[in-house]
Amino acid sequence: SSDLHICYPFRVADFFVLNKLIKESYYCKMRYYGSFFIYFYFYIKKGVVKMANNIVNFTKDSQEEYKIRRKKDYEKTCRVNNLVDDVLNEAGVPFIRNNTHIELQKQGVDLVIFRNGKPVSVDEKYATSCWNRPLNTFSFELASRNNTNNAGWFSSSSLFTQDYMLVWLRASEETLRDVFYLDIMFVEKETIRKYLAERNIDIPKTLKDFTDKALFSRNNKRRELKLHGGIKIVQNLTFFESPINIIIPKSDLRKIAYYECCYHRDPSTPQEMRLAA
């Protein structure tokens, strides 16, 4: 970032800048404004120093921390799976959960649902990081250093996934032991690709554009490239895998989803359950 290049310690040159400001304010008989300019000069400089310090003040998690984080995420989703299954059963969605074939799970098959009597392989994705606040988007992984050829689960052509089950949730605590809200959407993978193509978003080209044009956040923890209609590409630089995700608005996903069902419960009354299909 260019901010680092303009962050420098107090030098002799600063003295001449101040001296020039003082002289100008004296000769123009504008001491008040001269004082303001002097204050403004140091205020901006202090802000630049603070910004530059923030830029380098973060730590990327290690491979071991990544494994721990992944394990915790898996444990969270396992806790929610039973509730999701109950919601799908009550909504009348025919499905089989893949609990035993680990290799098949790695190939993007967590569920098999039946559409018009035909089996469809489904990869379930949870927005677990936003358990305590509303989320109006969903992230689809385009690239990750942890995967084969660095391909993300959305951009990979080797996985068996046909559809995605996208799950937004709210819970009383981060462990997700008490989930009181679920919003579940089923979307065809190919339909999402068509949705992006209609907006002239080609994944390989977009990844190249991201490499060339993405902007760093102020603290350098993220890189971001805004596209069309609320769609953007984001990379989290604090994670070991440095994932690059395409972020799609939830309202757009709702338009292209072929099925949606919701679960609402008042956190204070665990017995109450309501489905809205």
Image (cartoon, grey):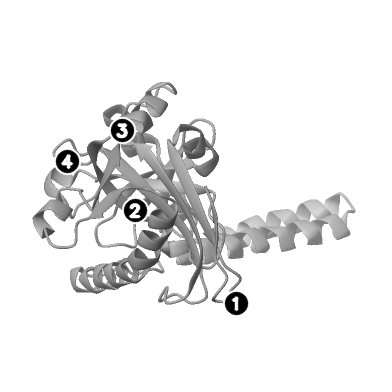
The residue that appears at 12% across and 59% down in the rendered structure is 102
Assess whether mark 1 and mark 2 are in contact (beta carbons under 8 angstroms): no
* Residue 67 to residue 19: above or below: below
Sequence order check: which comes first, mark 3 or mark 2?
3
Query: Quick check: 51 left or right of 155?
Result: right
Give the residue at mark 2.
125
Give the residue at mark 1.
269
Give the residue at mark 3.
116
Q: Which marked residue is nearer to the observer: mark 3 or mark 2?
A: 3
* Circle 1 Cα neighbour tier, 10 Å, few/some/many (<14 / 14–19 / ≥20): few
Q: Which marked residue is nearer to the observer: mark 4 or mark 1?
A: 1
Q: Secondary structure at mark 2?
A: strand
The residue that appears at 17% across and 35% down in the rendered structure is 157
Q: Secondary structure at mark 3?
A: loop
Residue 71 lies, in percent from the top left, at: 24, 71
Foreground pick, 6 / 109: 109
* Circle 2 Cα neighbour tier, 10 Å, few/some/many (<14 / 14–19 / ≥20): some
Residue 258 lies, in percent from the top left, at: 42, 35
The answer for how far apart the CA atoms under marks 4 and 3 are is 19 Å
Sequence order check: which comes first, mark 4 or mark 1?
4
Foreground pick, 44 / 250: 250
Q: Which marked residue is nearer to the observer: mark 3 or mark 1?
A: 3
Give the residue at mark 4.
160
Sequence order check: which comes first, mark 4 or mark 2?
2
The residue that appears at 36% across and 25% down in the rendered structure is 194
